[in-house]
Image (cartoon, helix red, strand yellow):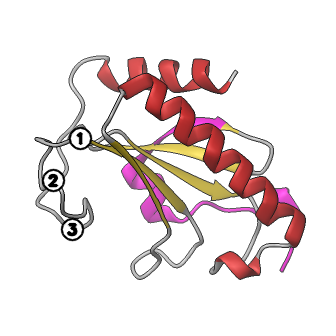
Amino acid sequence: MQADPSAFVLDSRLEADTTPVCDLALCRLLLMRDARWPWLILVPRRAGLVELFDLEDADRRQLLDEANAVARALDTATRPEKINIGALGNVVRQFHLHVVARSSGDPNWPKPVWGFESALPYGSGADEALIRSVQEGLR
């Protein structure tokens, strides 16, 4: 595994489906372009990662710290009933960690967000407002 962040390339599917939020110490933080759920994705800026265990020990600890900070910021920004954190990599092999805010009454509650119907675009400025709120929560 290569630890050089300059060798990091975001998977084209993640790039196409998300909006950048910020770069943290380890991860690029992205907002999924789907207004049905506040849905963030952490992608460690390390080349060739497929599995969590591909991360060096220090990076794995940093990922956990960043996931915790992102989950708290998303919780503060959206006040959901539940924050879901998970890693699935069957479609996009590049390791990435999902942080999704869920509440009863949202589409497909309490079932998973993955593969449920088609994404709905954010309304005018709603994604930017959520991004600003998350960024503020990370400060």
- Looking at numbered disc 2 in the image, what kind of residue is underneath it? Trp
- Looking at numbered disc 1 in the image, what kind of residue is underneath it? Ser
Q: Which is nearer the eye, 130 or 71?
A: 71
Side (left or right) of 30 relative to 22: left
- Tag 1's secondary structure? loop
* Nearest to N terminus: mark 2 or mark 3: 2
Side (left or right) of 8 relative to 15: right
Q: CA distance from mark 1 to mark 3?
A: 18 Å
Q: In x, y percent, where is residue 121?
A: 21, 37
Residue at the spot of label 3: 115
Classify 10 Å Cα crowding around label 2: few (below 14), some (14-19), many (20 and above). few
Q: Contact (CB < 8 A) between labels 1 and 3?
A: no
Residue 24 on the magenta span: no
Residue at the spot of label 2: 109
Q: Is residue 53 above or below residue 129?
A: below
* Nearest to N terminus: mark 1 or mark 3: 1
Classify 10 Å Cα crowding around label 3: few (below 14), some (14-19), many (20 and above). few
Residue 19 on the magenta span: yes
- Looking at numbered disc 3 in the image, what kind of residue is underneath it? Gly
Q: CA distance from mark 2 to mark 3?
A: 13 Å
Residue at the spot 49% in from the left edge and 19% down from the top edge: 133
Circle number at residue 103? 1
Q: In x, y percent, where is residue 39?
A: 38, 45
- Tag 3's secondary structure? loop
Q: Contact (CB < 8 A) between labels 2 and 3?
A: no
Q: Is residue 11 above or below residue 18?
A: below
Stretch in magenta: 1-22
Which quarter of the figure has residue 56?
A: bottom right
Which quarter of the figure has residue 62?
A: bottom right
Residue at the spot 86% in from the left edge and 74% down from the top edge: 2
